[in-house]
Every structure is written in structure tokens, then in C-alpha cells.
Image (spheres, grey):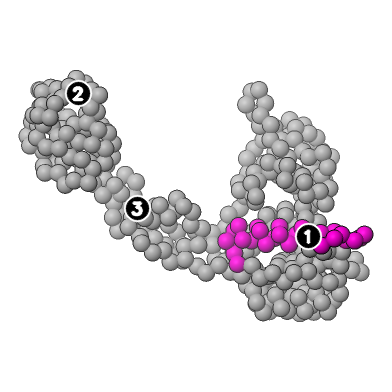
Amino acid sequence: IAAQDYHSTIAIPPQDNSAMDGFALNAHDLSEQRDFVVSQRIPAGSQPAALEANSAARIFTGGVVPGGANAVVIQENCDYDENRVRIRKPVEVGANIRPKGQDITVGARVVEKGKKLSAVDLSLLASIGVAEVAVQAPIRVAIFSTGDELIEPGKPLEVGQIYNSNRPLLIGLCEQLGYAVYDCGVVEDTLPATKAALAEAAAHSDFIISSGGVSVGEEDHVKPAVEALGTLDLWKIQMKPGKPVAFGWIDQTPFLGLPGNPVSSFVVFQLIGRLLLEHRQGEMASPPIEYPVLAGFSKKLSQREEYIRVKIQTNEDGTLVAAPFHNLSSGVMSSLSWADGLVRHEADSAINEGQTISFLPLTDGLI
Ligand code: AMP
Ligand code: MG
């Protein structure tokens, strides 16, 4: 994440240069002559002299256009040897020239503070001569899973147990986004254990994420633990999957309690958690991209905003149609592995097959 703005102190390209192999000349000369003396040779990386009057310069891609020349004729339109060239086709002023500053002008902002730096950004910064980039240290995200039924993969499964699949999910999502992770493991379903986990997490992190235990069952201790140690700002969201969600603070450390079901955990992380982490990190928000597609299914009115796991099919006429997974239970993680993305089903509305709906593409996270 860029820690400051970057402005260019140079123009890119730094000088007018040739986009092609050919001959640089003054296009106005072509109204009077087609045969030119080749007065100099300009490969990329060389410093040309000004163009001699009524002459042409042999030039190669990336070569600096000499003063006095205003066009490059591609070599395919020339008959030439080392000393002379005949131009078979006239050219317009500016032809085959990449003008100085066409990409970046002096003073232009190339990277904005808070931008997550991609390989493209590093290339852009390199192109303006930046050798070292000031970046923000990644925030550290504490992650714990609640649930007495959870055991870690690698151990045999007893009746009533399930493997902890939220742990690699949430650790992986945070690491993919570039954050450091403080792994607090699994926390048993008691109030003291949940409070102890929150306190430890707050002491070691900039942001706390938990999964499970956030409903109102007797085995759900996240809400009372947050209320006992800090403040609860939000509890429950009208969305599906993902109704049991909590947001609060343990001292100065923000806390997000995700639902236990892995699909719900994923969807809430993607739609809400990611934006909270970006804000905490001080980086630019990256809300998911939404594309209009046609619904390949109908759905009854829903009171909660629903996110449906779909694959996209292309109709013969090129329109994109979303088809849902056969089982949309929030416990069915294979649906997410199968899906191309999610479609948004607005609250208090029905979906009719063929209507336009919003599609949010998914790779490992929402794009
Ligand atoms: P909870 O919100 O704690 O009631 O959990 C809801 C459902 O998600 C239950 O069926 C849990 O067994 C399941 N679940 C909770 N945590 C995890 C986890 N870390 N990995 C897989 N499933 C989980
Ligand atoms: Mg639980």
C-alpha cells in the first residue's frame, strides 16, 4: 500500500520517439521531393543531431526523433540503401511518432497514497525512475474460531466433530489481501474463554475477526464477551447468507464477528470485512465490481438481501445468464468452489427469470 502520492518529475516518453523502424523526415518536404539523402542513423538509445534540411534520418523503434523531423515513414513504404531513400507513400505530420509526455506529463500523479501496489504500478513507478517506494506496514489481523465441535485437519474425526475450515479460509483471505495474521486458534464455547481470546487478540493485533458463536444460543458467547470487554456497535445484518454478524471494539481495536457457517463467513468477509480491513489499513476501498447479467432462475420475495452462488453461461446471442448452485445452504462450501460469483437479490423483491440482476465475480475473493 503506497504510503504517499507519487508524482512524475519527468515526461514519459521523455522525448518524441519513433513507434516504428523507418525514416524520420519533415512531412512538408514530401510535397516537393520523394528522394532523400540519409543524413544520420538513429537507433534506440542514441542522441540524434538536428535533421539536415531536405534529408531523412534512418530511425528505429524507440529512437529519438531529431529536431526538424515531424513524421516517420515506415520502412515498408520506402526503397532505400544506406545513403538514399525513396518514399513511396506520403505521410501526415506526426505519423508513427510517440509524442513526448503522451503517457505521463511532468507533475502528473502516477500513484495515489493508499493504493495497493500491483505489478503494473511498480512498472509505472519504475518508468518515472522511482527506485524505492514508501509503503505502509500491513496491519495485523487476529483470527479465532469458536466451537467445541471443531478439530484441526490431521486428527481423526470423532462423532459430533467437524474439521475447522474457517481457519484456513480467513487466514488465507487476509494473507491474500496482504495483511499479517495473528492466529489465535480455536476458542471453546464458554464466556471466560471467549473473553480471554478477545483480550489476547486485542493485545496483539490491529483488527480482530472471529467466526461462529455470534447468535443467541446458549453456546454463543461472542456478543456478551464483546459487551463485557468493550462496545458492540452492530449485531445482526439483514443478509443471507450471513445474518449473525457483530461489529464492535475491544478498546481501540475493531472487532468483526463472522457467522460460523463457512459460506456465510466468506460472504460477510467479502462484502463487509474486506472494506473494514481496508479502512483500518488506510488503503483505498475496493468495493466489489458488479456486472448486469440475466437471471436464469426465479426466486420468491425475500426479506433479507441475498447473495446467490451462480455460474455464468453465455447464451447464443451473447447475453450472460446466471444459474444458481443446486443447494444454497450456507453450510455447503462446495458451492463457492463451483461458483463464478454471486448475484445480489435485493431485499423485499422477487427475481423473475430473464430479468437483469447484479453479478459480483469471484476468483478467490470478490473482484
Ligand atoms: P455457530 O454460529 O457457532 O452456531 O456455527 C454455525 C455453524 O457453522 C455450525 O454448524 C458450526 O458447526 C459451523 N461452524 C462454526 N465454525 C466453523 C468452522 N470454524 N469451520 C467449519 N464450520 C464451522
Ligand atoms: Mg458455535
- Report the magenta residues as a range: 155-180
Question: In the picture, residue 319 is in which quadrant?
Answer: top right
In the displayed structure, does residue 138 sit left or right of residue 224?
left
Callout count = 3
- The verdict on residue 15 being magenta is no
Q: Amino acid at mark 2?
A: Cys
- The verdict on residue 157 being magenta is yes
Instruction: Residue 265: give x, y in percent of width and height.
Output: 75, 57
Q: CA–CA distance between discs 1 and 2?
A: 70 Å
Category of crowding for the residue at label 3, using alpha-carbon neighbours closer than 10 angstroms: few (below 14), some (14–19), many (at least 20): some
Name the N-terminal-most of marks 3 and 2: 2
Residue denoted by label 2: 78
Give the residue at x 20% y 36%: 59
The vertical placement of 173 against 43, above or below, is: below
Helix, strand, or loop for circle 2?
strand
Give the residue at x 51% y 58%: 116
Name the foreground residue: 199 vs 8: 199
Q: CA–CA distance between discs 3 and 2?
A: 33 Å
Q: Amino acid at mark 3?
A: Ser
Q: CA–CA distance between discs 3 and 1?
A: 47 Å
Name the foreground residue: 127 vs 6: 127
The vertical placement of 271 against 25, above or below, is: below
Instruction: Residue 264: give x, y in percent of width and height.
Output: 77, 54
Category of crowding for the residue at label 1, using alpha-carbon neighbours closer than 10 angstroms: few (below 14), some (14–19), many (at least 20): few
Residue denoted by label 1: 153
Residue denoted by label 3: 127
Confirm if mark 3 falls within 8 A of ligand 1: no
Give the residue at x 17% y 40%: 42
Helix, strand, or loop for circle 1?
loop
Q: Amino acid at mark 1?
A: Pro
